[in-house]
Amino acid sequence: MTPWPAGEKPGEAGPPAIFLDRDGVLNAAVVRNRKPFPPSTVDELRVLPDVKDALARLKAAGYRLVVVTNQPDVARGAQTRDGVEAINSALGAQLPIDEFRVCYHDDRDGCTCRKPKPGLLLREPRHDLARSAIVGDRGKDVEAGVQAGVGATVFIDRGYGEPLHTKPDAAVHSLSEAVDWILSGRRQGRADRREGSARGSSEREGASEASGGGIPRK
């Protein structure tokens, strides 16, 4: 599978993607009082040691790698777009990232792209979301994936102690572990589980009706 097939039309489902949060997933977050913050400058950027190999494995499996990151410090006046883009460029020079998608808004802006809203995942070019996954270190990442309809959500627990309002499909402690899970037979996304559940329910109903114990459907 090529990263982006030639002739793909806007609006059509493309290849599967792995949507990746940035800070705390690809690079070390700056943690203060157990709360993660992005690096302010390229000098503060530290790519986590397992990331390059983990991403290479995903690329080899045919996934597009799309970073989806909230950067509200721009709206708050504590960072500039140029500063964020410089950090993204530095990451892109070291890692096989296909695309960076950034929300520069704060909650009060009422945008549709700030996670947990799914806007970043739904931008063009589109992907086959049912065969895609999101990996993040915050509950907002998991919720955005669910709202967008991705096939699987993977949470990297960095010990922030934040509550998870939406249960992820897998909880791990590193990107390497996340990739192990995505590429292994243990992965079964929500869409697959729903299909399996519906199939199992249909089979049970059929067996029940065949035995005379079920209520015929009208």
Image: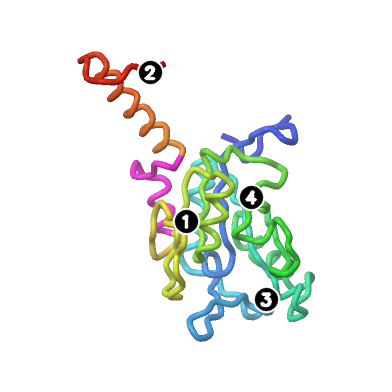
Going from the N terminus, do you reach mark 2 or mark 4 first?
Answer: 4
Magenta residues? Answer: 176-190
Residue at figure coordinates x 28%, y 25% from the top left: 204
Front in this rendered view, residue 117 or 2: 117
- Please name the predominant secondary structure of the magenta segment in the image: helix
Disc with the residue nearer the chain's start (4 vs 1): 1
Q: Amino acid at mark 4?
A: Leu
The amino acid type found where label 1 is placed reads Ala
Label 1 residue SS: helix
**Disc 2 to disc 4, how far (Cα)?**
39 Å
Is residue 205 left or right of 27 when viewed as pictured?
left
Query: Which mark lies nearer to you, 2 or 1?
Result: 2
Numbered badge on residue 54 = 1
Number of the label disc, if any, that sits on residue 121: 4
| Residue 42 marker | 3
The residue at the point 43 percent across, 42 percent down is 189
Quick check: 200 left or right of 80? left
